[in-house]
Image (cartoon, helix red, strand yellow):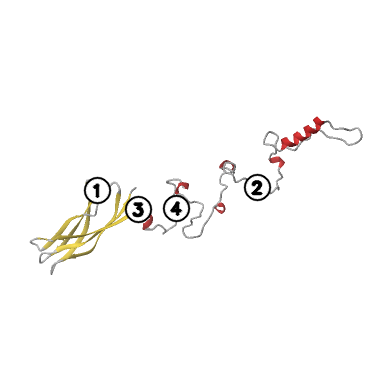
């Protein structure tokens, strides 16, 4: 709304302005530059006014708020990027700035997740069990392997395997070997089994290895 001056004065002898009229004009100007009704509005600002961003306040509590921003107005160009290692000065600097449970598989770049980004535990334990003799000349070795306390409610078993396996005693050989898994008292329980041919007493030895994914 344009500024309205209530009184107009004409020069010339005998033309005098009343004090009340002059004061009314001043009051009209003062009212235009106030925060009250009739103050400066959008219509009073030229479309090409080119107001500088530095002219806007940076005082907390007086700055532009989310209510003044249009939906979807913040684009990637406006977000702070940081090409240095670790990007410490990037715009998104806290996990609290991302809503839980919204990142989908398609949002992840292919072949980027390494083991150190997963709650994966690798455990290995050496074992040694005596071979049992049968009339047929075959040997069986099996037994429990203590890989530590791994609660079923906390861990999923991703993979079990045996490495560096061997059978002691001349003439003894392994036909097959495999790890075993079961549940005991709310924990995962592990073991090994080996079948082989034996000509004398011996032991089945090796290392049982496991890869576990933490559920929570």
* Label 2: few (<14), some (14–19) or many (≥20) C-alpha neighbours in 10 Å: few
Q: Residue 17: where, in percent of width, then height?
A: 85, 32
- Name the element at disc 1: strand
Whole-number angstrom distance, CA of label 1 to CA of label 3: 18 Å
> Of the residues under marks 2 and 3, which one precedes in the sequence?
2
Examine the rendered structure and indicate whether residue 64 appears above or below residue 211. above
Residue 211 sits in which quadrant? bottom left
Q: Pointer 2: what residue?
A: 55
Whole-number angstrom distance, CA of label 2 to CA of label 1: 65 Å
- Pointers 4 and 3 in contact (CB under 8 A)? no
Which tag is nearer the camera, tag 4 or tag 1?
1
- Name the element at disc 2: helix
Examine the rendered structure and indicate whether residue 14 appears above or below residue 79. above
Q: Which mark is residue 119?
A: 3
> Of the residues under marks 1 and 3, which one precedes in the sequence?
3
Examine the rendered structure and indicate whether residue 59 appears above or below residue 125. above
Which tag is nearer the camera, tag 4 or tag 3?
3
Which tag is nearer the camera, tag 2 or tag 1?
2
Whole-number angstrom distance, CA of label 4 to CA of label 2: 43 Å
């Amino acid at each position: 709304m344009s500024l309205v001056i209530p009184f107009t004065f004409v020069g010339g002898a005998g033309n005098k302005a009343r004090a009340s009229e002059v004061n009314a004009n001043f009051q009209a100007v003062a009212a235009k530059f106030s925060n009250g009704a009739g103050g400066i509005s959008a219509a009073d600002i030229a479309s090409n006014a080119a107001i500088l961003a530095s002219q806007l306040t940076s005082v907390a509590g007086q700055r532009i708020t989310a209510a003044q921003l249009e939906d979807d107005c913040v684009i990637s160009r406006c977000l702070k990027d940081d090409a240095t290692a670790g990007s410490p000065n990037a715009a998104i600097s806290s996990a609290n700035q991302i809503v839980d449970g919204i990142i989908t598989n398609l949002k992840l770049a292919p072949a980027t997740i390494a083991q150190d980004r997963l709650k994966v535990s690798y455990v290995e334990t050496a074992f040694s069990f005596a071979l049992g003799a049968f009339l047929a000349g075959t040997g069986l070795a099996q037994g429990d392997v203590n890989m530590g306390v791994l609660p079923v409610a906390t861990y999923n078993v991703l993979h079990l395997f045996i490495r560096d396996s061997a059978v002691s005693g001349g003439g003894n050989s392994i036909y097959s070997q495999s790890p075993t898994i079961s549940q005991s008292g709310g924990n995962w329980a592990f073991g090994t089994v080996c079948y082989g041919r034996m000509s004398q007493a011996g032991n089945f030895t090796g290392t049982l290895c496991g890869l576990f994914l933490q559920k929570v």
